[in-house]
């Protein structure tokens, strides 16, 4: 079964850090670009970051640039999101998503169940 | 405010049809394909349409997509109560060098 499972969410104070993980199974992880997408409570989807299969290309939303770092370990079928200098507005459910075969980054054909990050004092 | 503009909500009776518009610009929809996602309450999004008008396997042909210029449209025919969800369009923006989504449209049946 093709599956993505996120973990690492939790409650953190403003200015703090958190590292999200996403473990992939059931497909060739090394063949796919991967994304992080978030959804603030009661709000819409927001693309956060993309990382190509070889980790050569990384892209970030302006809202997280300089604070978040995306990375992957293909040997462990794992995707990560290191989040530093967290702000209240970073509070959201964070989804890990697989990009389909090809170069279209916004074609996300497999999603995880999400992990909740709450930034509050 | 989202880069792509969608109506906040649309509604129709069971069996009827709805269309959801997604308006962008030359740096996003005008320059790339559009994807559509369905998010049922309390669940992760699901890919509904890709490359503006293609359906992944398992998606019924009641769902269709089209694109013209800087706008895209999702159509749902034969509405069912199970179609009640939020629908999002998404694409890449070359000026921003980032992915962008519409604000989402809530469909009520």
Image (cartoon, coloured by chain):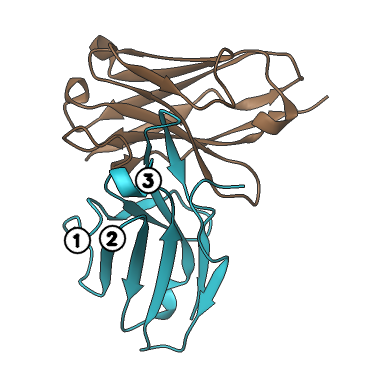
Q: From the viewer's perspective, is B6 left or right of A104?
A: right
Above-or-below relation of A96 to B53: above
Category of crowding for the residue at label 3, using alpha-carbon neighbours closer than 10 angstroms: few (below 14), some (14–19), many (at least 20): some
Q: Nearer the viewer, residue B4 or A4?
A: B4
Tell me the quadrant of the picture where the N terminus of chain A can be found: top left
Residue to which mark 1 is pinned: B58
Q: Quadrant of the rendered structure where residue B68 is? A: bottom left
Residue A27 in the image: state x and y as whole percent.
18, 31
Category of crowding for the residue at label 1, using alpha-carbon neighbours closer than 10 angstroms: few (below 14), some (14–19), many (at least 20): few
Q: Is residue B39 visible?
A: no
Residue to which mark 2 is pinned: B67
Tell me the chain of label 3: B
Determine the residue positioned at 31% across, 16% down. A57
Q: Quadrant of the rendered structure where residue B22 is? A: bottom left
Residue A32 in the image: state x and y as whole percent.
22, 27
SS for callout 2:
strand
The tag on residue B26 is: 3
Instruction: Report whether mark 3 lies on the same chain as mark 1.
Output: yes
Tell me the chain of label 2: B
Label tally: 3
Q: Nearer the viewer, mark 3 or mark 1?
A: 3
Residue B17 in the image: state x and y as whole percent.
36, 83
Q: Which chain is brown?
A: A
Query: CA separation, marks 3 and 1?
Result: 32 Å
Q: Nearer the viewer, mark 2 or mark 3?
A: 3
Q: Colour of chain B?
A: cyan
Q: Quadrant of the rendered structure where residue A40 is? A: top right
Residue A73 in the image: state x and y as whole percent.
31, 11
Q: From the viewer's perspective, is B56 left or right of A70?
A: left
């Amino acid at each position: 079964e093709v599956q993505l499972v996120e973990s690492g969410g939790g409650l953190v104070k403003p200015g703090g850090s958190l590292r999200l993980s996403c473990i992939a199974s059931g497909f060739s992880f090394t063949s796919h670009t991967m994304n992080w997408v978030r959804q603030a409570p009661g709000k819409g989807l927001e693309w956060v970051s993309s990382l190509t299969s070889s980790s050569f290309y990384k892209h970030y939303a302006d809202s997280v640039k300089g604070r978040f770092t995306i990375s992957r370990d293909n040997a462990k079928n794992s995707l990560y999101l290191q989040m530093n200098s967290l702000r209240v507005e970073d509070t959201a459910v964070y989804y890990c998503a697989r990009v389909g075969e090809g170069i279209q980054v916004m074609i996300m054909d497999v999603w995880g169940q999400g992990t909740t990050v709450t930034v509050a004092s | 405010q989202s880069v792509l503009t969608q109506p906040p909500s649309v509604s129709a009776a069971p069996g009827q049809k709805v269309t959801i518009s997604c308006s962008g610009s030359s740096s996003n929809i005008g320059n790339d394909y559009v994807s559509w996602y369905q998010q049922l309450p309390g669940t992760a999004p699901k890919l509904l349409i890709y490359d503006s008008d293609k359906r992944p396997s398992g998606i019924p042909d009641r769902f269709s997509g089209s694109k013209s210029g800087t706008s895209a449209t999702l159509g749902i025919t034969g509405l069912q109560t199970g179609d009640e969800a939020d629908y999002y369009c998404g694409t890449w923006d070359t000026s921003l060098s980032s992915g962008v989504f519409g604000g989402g449209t809530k469909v009520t049946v």
